[in-house]
Image (cartoon, grey):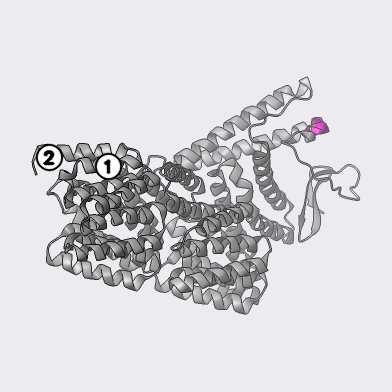
């Protein structure tokens, strides 16, 4: 084709894409001499490119291609290309997979009618993707393997890569992550070895496939709990995404980064990237990607114990999924499981069990063994909540077997915690202790503090049961330190819920100190727990509201508190924006610990000044930053001072200072 004809075609396609819908087919009629099969393929590619910018516009363009084929050329292959363009919009933009599958199959039939092999293969490759999304894995893999054999025999790297990527996605959705990773590694090797291209379009395709493969490879690595390798791969994908047009590639990379940071326990960073992904998907009207991102954000809220947010988000996801014809069974199953876990935490066990049952039905239809194991883990948690220890052990063992076979150590460890607690409650302390120890060792080796905390807590309880007070204290202290370190990396509004299920660690440590008749240790732990819970609650409720001085003599203290609060906010923001936005940055572990220590120091100074203001004037308690407990300790002898009170196992205790400075617990 001459340069003049190429330029003319490009000009016509560019104009066609900007015209009102009613004018597109008449415009193409005016250029009927250009309407070859290659030209229709260019129209299809132009419509597909618009998916990343505006799916509704892309659909309108695709529909006009079919109309032009039917009214102008009446060529079956031209119509097939239009059908494929429409199917691409439904599959990759709108997520209507069943509708897309019907269109791709119609395109295959049209290509057979027109005796065209190349575009028939393209339509078959697309079917591999949508069949995988619909849970029809065997059909997807059979078609994909046939295409790959043909591509290898013709040294066709483009076709081989496209078919392989879609097969790997089907394997991942099936739960066969190891096979998916093997395929992705094979694709990466082929793409990185490809340095010569027959056209600029082939070079562009190469770039897009490198992005797609590194992204999907990252997801597979993360599913196998190889988090730092996953980050390497997804940051490579993000680097490539920044060279591509449209916001969806960046959104997909942001989403994958956020998910990986979530599993590393870096929730602030995860939510930061989830928001960037949400913005990118909304910009492009990418409904399915938005739903998937919402699922991962919901999982993050679950880890932060924000139960109401989880329930609301899961319900919204289920309602969105219900508007599609098919292809969202997996997303619906996951939403049911997340809602079940939130309902369990709120004590609504029957409603939680209903959600788990619905999830199991959907996952059984999809033959997704990995997520069925997640459902069994949830059933084990529900059984544990009801003190049904035999079923807790049964379901946990079922899930652990699957996770072990699929080489998923983090999922295995999470389930092992449920198993260990059931053993502990049955009095099998020795086996429970071994299981907790295995989880703690794995979590510490991988730097997963969120997983180490419950394991260390369990080890502390087991040590208490064995009358090993010294080791119990060590385990509790180690768990508390990790709680405090994780807490300082979270935004202020996230801290109160995060801490809500971890105060039990403080309570068990306090109980141990009481049993040992150690008032100083008891007082220290009580203050440590209450100071953090109090400050988190204040930060959540008062946000940026400064304290107001009620008396001129108090102004210096009030100004000092407000200044310290500003300093604390700055330190917290510094931590949030520098820890892990790129895990390869220069923000060292030593610097991180320095900032966390500074945050704790500022909190302690603020708490001390707040108490001083309360002593000066009880009216300060009416301001949002102050809270009081209205319960009095009876029979407080003369000349003694009450400095703290708290409850353990429903019994009210008091830290009392006797004349001469001696502290005792009552």
| In this rendering, the label closer to the viewer, 1 or 2 | 1
Residue 618 colored in magenta in the image: yes
Q: Is residue 182 left or right of residue 344?
A: left
User: Which sits in the foreground, 235 or 631?
Assistant: 235
Q: Which residues are magenta?
A: 614-619
Helix, strand or loop for disc 2: helix
- Residue 164: x and y in percent read 26, 63
Quarter of the figure with residue 172: bottom left
Q: Nearer the viewer, residue 63 or 166?
A: 63
Could one spot residue 398 in this view of the protein?
A: yes
The residue under the point 18% across, 40% down is 9
Image spot of residue 512 (x, y percent): 69, 60
Residue at numbered disc 1: 26
Q: Main secondary structure of the magenta part?
A: helix
Q: Residue furthest top?
A: 552
Are the two marked residues, 1 and 2, in contact with CB atoms closer than 8 angstroms?
A: no
Could you tell me which quadrant the N terminus lies in? top left
The one of 611 and 343 positioned closer to us in this rendering: 343
Q: First in sequence: mark 1 or mark 2?
A: 2
Q: Which x, y percent locates residue 445? A: 43, 59
Q: Which residue is mark 2?
A: 5
């Amino acid at each position: 084709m001459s340069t003049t004809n190429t330029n003319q075609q490009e000009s016509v396609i560019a104009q066609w894409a900007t015209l009102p819908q009613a004018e597109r087919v008449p415009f193409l009629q005016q250029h009927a001499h250009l309407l070859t099969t290659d030209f229709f393929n260019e129209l299809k590619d132009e419509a597909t490119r618009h998916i990343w910018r505006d799916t509704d516009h892309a659909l309108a363009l695709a529909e006009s291609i079919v109309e032009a084929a039917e009214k102008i050329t009446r060529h079956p292959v031209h119509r097939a290309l239009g059908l494929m363009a429409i199917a691409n919009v439904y599959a990759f933009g709108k997520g209507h997979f069943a509708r897309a599958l019907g269109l791709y199959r119609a395109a295959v039939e049209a290509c057979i009618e027109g005796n065209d092999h190349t575009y028939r293969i393209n339509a078959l490759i697309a079917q591999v993707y949508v069949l995988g999304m619909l849970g029809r894995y065997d059909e997807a893999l059979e078609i994909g393997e046939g295409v790959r054999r043909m591509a290898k025999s013709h040294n066709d790297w483009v076709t081989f890569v496209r078919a392989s990527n879609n097969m790997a996605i089907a394997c991942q959705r099936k739960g066969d992550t190891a096979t998916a990773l093997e395929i992705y590694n094979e694709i990466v090797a082929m793409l990185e070895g490809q340095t010569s291209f027959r056209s600029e379009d082939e070079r562009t395709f190469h770039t897009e496939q490198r992005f797609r493969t590194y992204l999907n490879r990252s997801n597979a690595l993360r599913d196998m709990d190889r988090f730092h390798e996953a980050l390497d791969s997804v940051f490579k994908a993000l680097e490539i995404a920044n060279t591509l047009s449209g916001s969806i590639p960046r959104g997909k990379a942001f989403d994958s980064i956020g998910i990986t940071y979530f599993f590393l326990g870096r929730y602030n960073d995860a939510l930061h990237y989830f928001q960037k992904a949400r913005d990118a998907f909304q910009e492009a009207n990418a409904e399915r990607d938005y739903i998937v991102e919402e699922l991962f954000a919901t999982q993050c809220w679950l880890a932060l114990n924000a139960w109401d947010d989880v329930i609301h988000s899961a319900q919204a996801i289920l309602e969105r999924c219900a508007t599609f014809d098919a292809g969202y069974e997996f997303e619906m199953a996951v939403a049911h499981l997340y809602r079940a876990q939130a309902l369990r935490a709120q004590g609504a066990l029957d409603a939680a069990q209903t959600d788990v049952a619905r999830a199991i039905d959907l996952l059984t239809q999809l033959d997704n063994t990995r997520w069925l194991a997640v459902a069994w883990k949830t059933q084990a948690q529900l059984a544990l909540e009801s003190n049904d220890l035999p079923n807790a052990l049964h379901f946990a063992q079922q899930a652990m077997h699957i996770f072990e076979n699929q080489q998923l150590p983090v999922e295995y460890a999470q389930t092992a915690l449920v198993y260990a607690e059931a053993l502990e409650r049955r009095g099998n302390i020795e086996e429970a202790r071994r299981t907790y120890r295995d989880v703690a060792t794995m979590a510490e080796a991988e730097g997963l503090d969120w997983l180490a905390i419950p394991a260390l807590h369990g080890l502390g309880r087991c040590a208490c049961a064995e009358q090993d007070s010294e080791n119990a204290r060590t385990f509790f202290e180690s768990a508390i330190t990790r709680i405090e370190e994780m807490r300082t990396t979270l935004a202020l509004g996230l801290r109160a819920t995060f801490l809500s299920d971890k105060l039990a660690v403080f309570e068990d440590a306090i109980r141990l100190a009481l049993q040992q008749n150690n008032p100083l240790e008891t007082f220290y732990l009580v203050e440590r727990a209450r100071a953090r819970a109090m400050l988190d609650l204040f930060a959540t409720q008062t946000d940026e509201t400064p304290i107001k001085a009620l008396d001129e003599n108090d102004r210096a203290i009030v100004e000092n508190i407000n200044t310290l609060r500003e300093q604390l906010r700055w330190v917290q923001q510094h931590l949030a924006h520098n820890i892990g936005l790129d895990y390869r940055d220069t923000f060292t572990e030593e610097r991180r610990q320095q900032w966390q220590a500074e945050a704790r120091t500022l909190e302690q100074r603020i708490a001390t000044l707040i108490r001083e203001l309360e002593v000066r004037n009880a009216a300060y308690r009416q301001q949002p930053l102050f809270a009081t407990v209205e319960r009095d300790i009876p029979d407080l002898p003369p000349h003694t001072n009450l400095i703290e009170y708290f409850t353990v196992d429903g019994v009210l205790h008091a830290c009392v200072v006797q004349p001469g400075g001696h502290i005792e617990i009552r």
